Image (spheres, rainbow, N blue to C red):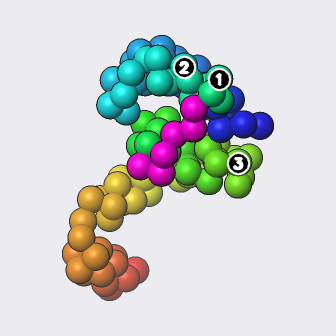
Amino acid sequence: MSIGRRIQQRREALRLTQEELADLVGTTQRQISRYERDTNSPGPDTIVMLARVLGTSTDYLLGLTDEPNKYADLDDIELEILDLLRSQNPTQRKKIMRAIKALV
């Protein structure tokens, strides 16, 4: 399946219009349409942004996996921890992980 088709499927699964997706990604509806029709390919930074907005991985968009949601098996607390870790710099991440390990 093409990257354009994967973008379209995720967008539709989230019930977003092309215009809404474009606003979230910081591009135009016309550009989203081009991506979905595979007449233009998104660049690396745009692929990362699309993956974040569409709640999937870059691997899924690029066709390296067929699993659109690599975190489907995580519960709300696990997702919250992941979001917290991602929002921190590497030094803070290490401190948080040491604290978690000390608790278990």
Residue 31 lies, with reference to residue 1, above or below; the image says above
Could you say which is closer to the camera, residue 14 or residue 60? 60
Whether residue 100 is visible to the viewer of this picture, yes or no, is yes
Point out the tag, 1 or 3, that comes first from the N-terminus.
1
Q: Position of residue 32 (x, y in %)?
A: 50, 24
Residue 6 lies, with reference to residue 83, above or below; the image says above
Quadrant including the C terminus: bottom left
Could you say which is closer to the camera, residue 28 or residue 14? 28
Report crowding for label 1: few under 14, some 14 to 19, many 20 or more residues within 10 A (C-alpha): some
44 in magenta: yes
Q: Position of residue 102 (x, y in %)?
A: 32, 85
CB contact under 8 Å: marks 1 and 2: yes
Amino acid at dot 2: Ser
The span picked out in magenta is 40-45
User: Distance between the Cα atoms at labels 1 and 3?
Assistant: 16 Å
Q: Nearer the viewer, mark 1 or mark 3?
A: 1
Whether residue 76 is visible to the viewer of this picture, yes or no, is no
Along the horizontal axis of the image, is 103 left or right of 30?
left
Along the horizontal axis of the image, is 46 left or right of 91?
right
Q: Position of residue 4 (x, y in %)?
A: 64, 31
Residue linked to disc 2: 33
Amino acid at dot 1: Arg
36 in magenta: no
Residue linked to disc 3: 63
Q: In the image, what residue occupies the spot 65% across and 38% down? A: 3
